[in-house]
Amino acid sequence: MGFWSKLKIGDLSTVDDLNTHGQTVWYQLPLPAATADARGQLVGELDWRDHDQILKRAKQIDRLFYGGIPTPSFPPGVEMTDSLRRTARRNYLHALVAHLQTHGLSWSDFMVYPADEPGLFGTIDHYMRNAEENKKLDARLQNYANPWGAITIDDIRRMAPVTDVWQPGMETVYVLGKKYVAAMREGGKPVWMYTPPGNARVLRPLGFYRAQPWLGFRWGIEGGGWWIYHSTDLWATHPDREPDYGAVASDGRSIVDSRRWEASRDGIEDYNMLSLLRDRLCARSDPAAEALLQEATTYVERTAFPGIPREAADYDLDFFRLMEYRAQIRDALERISN
């Protein structure tokens, strides 16, 4: 789970709150500035203190999510060429990997962001240029893609050779279906999902925030999140615009929680419960539990996802029905675990 979260709001750290609510994809840990010489070799030691302050406090890490590999600065008078820039960035990348290894992390534990929402306006060219350049630094560097908008399955196949982690917009999954997800999953690559839920004040705590992990489970997707944990004016005190994106409010002095943020955590716990039952059923057949799992996830899928605009759709869940499914799944787990 990742929420493109700020790690500080003003002087207030958000790390404890993000830990409590299940974040595992940590976004934009601060990377140190670097200087290179005329051959692209790094000069001096990198200062990792700000980076490591966050890293050491993150309780669960599935991926670290960097915007990109920085280009070091060069001494005055150095003629900048593509080759020199690439050499310096490659050296920075290898310094990053060496540092992460001191924390028990490796190439598979971080990724970079070549371009935002490839396909949104019908083109993936910018993504491809940046992703291919990243692979020239080192083929092991993982590129992250969040396709959205006018993306096609043919676009996904073109992106696949340079893409390692996928997080498509949930709307595109809903429209393009299982073949779309299957195209991203080729080669065993992880597939998550997300959406940018604007006008947060009117979004349903159950029908969107709690339901999203259920939809991911139903669609065979193992991760998710939404943009964004905190933005600016969540409650739209300004009279000329709608409420902003986000699940918490803060003026930098404290974090003000919301039902939506709590429902998101509940949904993550639901996903773990559903996954546990699925895994137990792989080891021990139980037709009644299999039927229950199918019924519960089908109900949420058919009820929760309305497409866009959500404001005009009836997509809320029946809380008492959802709680009854949870109780039945608990009972099924106890039965087949004995």
Image (cartoon, helix red, strand yellow):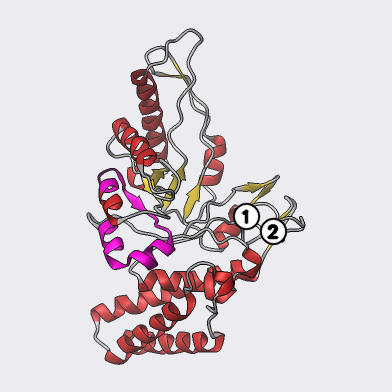
Locate residue 41, reporting x and y percent: 39, 18
**Helix or strand or loop: what does disc 1 sit on?**
loop
Occupied quadrant, residue 170: bottom left
Q: Which residues are magenta?
A: 158-185
Locate residue 18, reporting x and y percent: 57, 57
Q: Nearer the viewer, residue 33 or 209?
A: 209
Kind of residue at disc 1: His
Locate residue 227, reporting x and y percent: 53, 56
Residue in the image at 49% along x and 24% along y: 34
Let me know if residue 177 is in the magenta part.
yes
Locate residue 109, reporting x and y percent: 38, 47
Direction from residue 294 to residue 14 in the image, left or right: right
**Helix or strand or loop: what does disc 2 sit on?**
strand
- Any part of residue 104 in sight: no
Let me know if residue 232 is in the magenta part.
no
Query: Mark 1 — residue?
Result: 230
- Any part of residue 237 in sight: yes
Query: Mark 2 — residue?
Result: 249
- How far apart are the two marked residues, 2 and 1, measured between alpha carbons? 7 Å
In the rendered view, would you say 99 is above or below 60? above
In the rendered view, would you say 100 is above or below 304? above
How packed mark 2 is, by other alpha carbons closer than 10 Å (few <14, some 14-19, many 20 or more), is some
Q: Earlier in the sequence, mark 2 or mark 1?
A: 1
